[in-house]
Each structure stands twice: as structure tokens, then as C-alpha cells.
Image (spheres, rainbow, N blue to C red):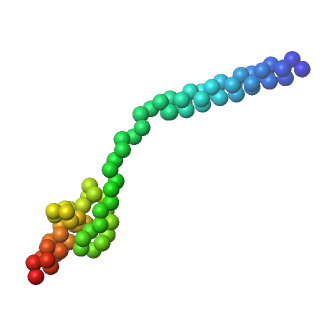
Amino acid sequence: MFIKLITLIVLILVVVTLVKRGKNKNSVADKSTPPAVVDESMKRCAQCGVHLPVAEAQTYQTLHFCCNEHKRSYLEDQDH
């Protein structure tokens, strides 16, 4: 009977310790700084219509293109 009581007490202490460690890890994660906000605006290619992030777009005046080839092709078509 005495061994069962000691085993139960040790088991309870282990569970309490693990729960406290879990709470500490969560509180540290909550206090960390949030990731930097990245502008994920999407633009439409004036030539083919595909949408792509503004950071990857080729621009000409107010127009956006998915690649230099489409930019060149669009501008050539506008000249004719």
C-alpha cells in the first residue's frame, strides 16, 4: 500500500511539472514579436492576364507584366 501511495505522488508531480513546462513554452511563444508584414498585393499581367505578386511584376508606367517578354510583346502590339 505504501509503494502505491509513493508511486501515485510521484506520478502526480511528474504530470504537474509537465503541465507547467507546457504553459511556460506557450507564454514565451505568445510574447515573441509577430512576423513582419509583407505586401502581398497581386497585379494582373496586361498581356496574358495571369496574377502575380507586385514584387515579382515587371512594370511600365501603370501597367504590370509577368515577364519582360510579355512587356515587350505588349508594347510592340501597341505601336502597330
Q: What residue do we see at 71% from left, 22% from top?
A: 13
Please name whichever residue, 31 or 61, is drawn nearer the observer in this view of the structure: 61
Residue 24 image position (x, y, % from top left): 56, 27
Please name whichever residue, 22 or 32, is drawn nearer the observer in this view of the structure: 32
Residue 29 image position (x, y, % from top left): 50, 33
Q: What residue do we see at 47% from left, 30% from top?
A: 31
Residue 57 image position (x, y, % from top left): 24, 61
Residue 80 image position (x, y, % from top left): 10, 82
In this picture, residue 36 sits left or right of residue 8: left
Q: What residue do we see at 69% from left, 25% from top?
A: 16
The quadrant of the image that shows the N terminus is top right
- Answer above or below: position of 75 versus 32: below
Quarter of the rendering containing residue 59: bottom left
Q: Residue furthest bottom?
A: 80
Q: Residue furthest left?
A: 79
In this picture, residue 12 sits left or right of residue 40: right
